[in-house]
Image: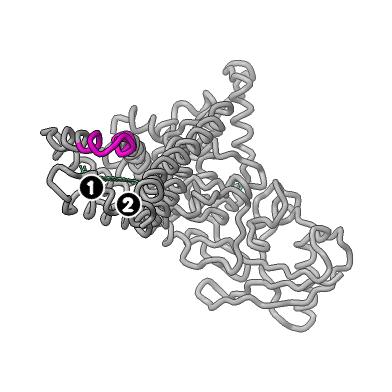
Amino acid sequence: MKVTLRVWRQTGPDGPGRLVSYEAEVPSTDMSFLELLDTVNEGLIAKGEDAIAFDHDCREGICGMCSQVIDGQPHGPDKAAATCQLHMRRFKDGDVITAEPFRAKAFPVVKDLVVDRSALDRVMTCGGFVSVNTGAAVDANAVLVPKDDAEKAMDAAACIGCGACVAACPNAAAMLFVGAKVSQFALLPQGAPERVRRVLSMRKAMDKEGFGHCSNEAECEAVCPKEVKISNIARLNREFIRALAVSDG
Amino acid sequence: METLARLVTSSIGRKLLVAAVGFLLCGFLMTHLAGNMFLFVGEKAFNTYARVLESNPFLLPIELALLGVILLHAVVALYLNLTSLAARPVGYAMKRSRGGRTWGSATMVYTAVLIGVFLVIHVKTFKYGVRPSPEDLYGLVMSYLQDWRWALFYAVVMAGLGLHLSHGAWSATQTFGIDHPKYTPLIKGAGLAFAVVVAAVFTAIPIWACWFLGGAR
Ligand code: HEM
Ligand code: SF4
Ligand code: FES
């Protein structure tokens, strides 16, 4: 099978960018889309041309490094899958496949399909953690967590920080990501001591990075490879309202 | 003080303002719709209603509050929209919805502008329009709505209003953090039902005025 790739090529952060077409022979439909890009890159390198830069690491859907908007959808057309989990059997002979970088002011393009998502990391440093005293491990049953809360916290903690929610959002908002990160602690007793400070400062960092506002479009939930729900955005809103009400500041 | 600052300077706080004020506007819509029902009863009933309303000493402060509320809703929402445009300076060559958006949510800005333009025209013609006689608001309303072009304009705007509410009503509850595995679908359904009923009953007025009373001038 043969496909045509239309790939966003951009020399650097400020460089001009454009979509460039590549005819690609697909040796096996069982290969992943990223493996196809590897193959195309081998050809480009053999010809002495610049290889297509794209992000990836684990290639098994757990690290959140792979990005790309494929055929207009972050992480491609499959539900609950990251770009690295997209396989060529999803396409037909003769298909034209468009690959673009995630688009957001907070995610500047580094090169080609690679964007800088450290804005999400900076938001995390403003409260996406719990402070604990080091020392002997606490007894497992010393702090009781209701089963339902543990489940919800785990569902929120499934977020791999890929940023697809931002890429899909018509407003380039990061509310699903921040909602997941605030929720995973808000639901657990371990998160309680820093609960107010966390939501206030993560919210502030999120706005500072230049993400848009949430208009409850739910496009984020639909593309999230980890199926993080917008219930977490509702919880983020609740946490924010609560923090406004109880903070002394 | 800091709480207030957080409310008006944060994206979430601003959304809360838009949502809270949106709820107030839904309340206004319901009272306005209820009052307009007197049009169906007849000339005398509607003009009596108008006289009672206009003789209320609190009408002016209420109208000013309403104006403030509408402006707050519009200005903050439009401002948020502008920040979101700035949040994606370079757009996609190809973008496909994954089914999260609805017609209502995808057209919020457009329906908002439509309603805004409508409001100016509406208040100018009905509130500050010249009545056949000082006590005859009914005559003024009918002089417009029995013209099919005005009736059509009203019908189009009401469809836009319905679309706006179809997303707005539910969205405001989500912004307030109201969410429950069982009740969220019910709230969404109720929001949609509210939008359809408000739009349909408002639309019924010009249709009725034009086709049944006016003989489609
Ligand atoms: C068929 C539909 C409608 C009819 C027949 C109608 C009729 C009227 C009339 C007769 C007035 C003047 C009241 C007075 O001067 O005492 C009025 C005022 C007003 N209407 Fe409507 N209306 C309709 C739909 C709407 C909608 C959908 C909205 C909002 C989105 C709206 C917003 C207003 C506002 C803000 C005022 C000014 C209120 C005030 O200053 O007291 N109307 N309407
Ligand atoms: S919420 Fe989902 S889409 Fe957003 S960063 Fe986390 S895993 Fe990616
Ligand atoms: S490469 Fe790790 S999630 Fe795709």
Residue A6, numbered label: none
Q: Callout 2: residue from which chain?
A: B
First-in-chain label (1 vs 2): 1
Q: Residues within 10 Å of mark 2 (few under 14, many from 20)?
A: many
x and y, in percent, of residue B157 in the image: 39, 53
Residue B145, numbered label: 2
Residue B35 on the magenta span: yes
Residue B139, numbered label: 1
Q: What stretch of residues is rendered in magenta? A: B34-47
Label 2 C-beta lies within 8 Å of the nearest ligand 1 atom: yes
Quadrant housing the N terminus of chain B: top left
- Label 1, label 2: how many angstroms apart (C-alpha)? 10 Å
B83 relative position to A162: left or right: left
Q: Residues within 10 Å of mark 1 (few under 14, many from 20)?
A: some
Q: Residue at the spot x=74%, y=83% of the render?
A: A48
Q: How does the figure colour the protein chain or chains?
A: one colour
Task: Provide the major secondary structure of the magenta segment.
Answer: helix
Q: Eyeballing the image, is A106 above or below A111?
A: above
x and y, in percent, of residue B174 in the image: 47, 37
- Name the quadrant containing residue A29: bottom right
